[in-house]
Amino acid sequence: MLETFRLIRLAVLARARSAGWAPWLLLVGWLFLAAYQEPLMFRGYGIYLVNDAAWTGGLVLLLVLLLAERRVPRRHAVTVNLSLVGSIAVLQAIGSCLVDQGYIAVPVSVRAEGAGFFFLSWAPLAITLSRNNSDVGVSRTVHMIVVLAAGLVGSMLAVALRSSPDAWVVAASALAIAGAACWSLHRRTT
């Protein structure tokens, strides 16, 4: 078990080092820019620009980290990608909490809920990216179509979870994660 955690930690560190420091600085700059450009009147209408900027910046950082280093051990590729999604979800929630200085404060519970929603919406994309596109019997075109479909589903789930989260949207997220896991874990034996 400790060997598995060590391997996952090393794969996540390899991806973070492969991406470099530029995406991290861009995310921090993006959050500060959103915090200082947010008009105070938006808060009265329920528009929190910092939270939206954190989601967008977190997604860009997630894509950079997922695509930075493709050499991940096959056994733990799904776990590594899901741990990246979870880490980015927590970091974007903490970053938006630290940067947000608005006069109507967003409760920490809302930010934690947002981190969970970030994970639920982008986990299918991370899972489909964990499958090696050189598997036997799967063409590169089919692999790219599945990844693009997972990205589209993730964006629709992100909008639904941010605007009106209910049990049906969470169930749709769970089904999307299950479908991505089936795609990722299926190995053709012929």
Image (cartoon, rainbow, N blue to C red):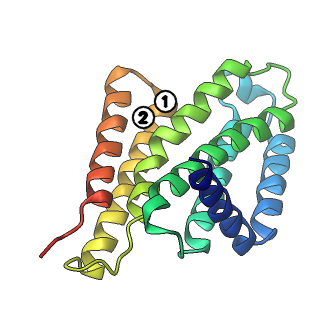
Task: Pinpoint residue 40: horizontal percent, then vertical percent.
Answer: 81, 28
Q: Is residue 185 left or right of residue 121?
A: left
* Residue sitting at x 35%, y 50%: 153
Residue 32 higher or lower than 81, as above or below: above
Q: What residue type is disc 2 on?
A: Ala
Mark 1 → mark 2, Cα distance in angstroms: 5 Å
Q: Nearer the viewer, residue 5 or 181?
A: 5
Q: Residue at x 52, y 33 (%)?
A: 162
Q: Residue at x 60, y 55 (%)?
A: 3
Image disc number at residue 163: 1
Q: Is residue 69 visible?
A: yes
For mark 1, give the secondary structure: helix
Q: Position of residue 63 (x, y in %)?
A: 57, 63
7 or 67: nearer the viewer: 7
Residue 93, horizontal then vertical, whole percent = 70, 36
Q: Is residue 119 above or below residue 126?
A: above
Q: Are marks 1 and 2 in contact (CB under 8 Å)?
A: yes
The numbered mark at residue 160 is 2
**Kind of residue sitting beneath label 1:** Ser
**Secondary structure beneath label 2:** helix
Q: Please name whichever residue, 72 or 47, is drawn nearer the observer in this view of the structure.
A: 72
- Above or below for 139 versus 13: below
Q: Quadrant of residue 171?
A: top left
Residue 97, horizontal then vertical, whole percent: 79, 32
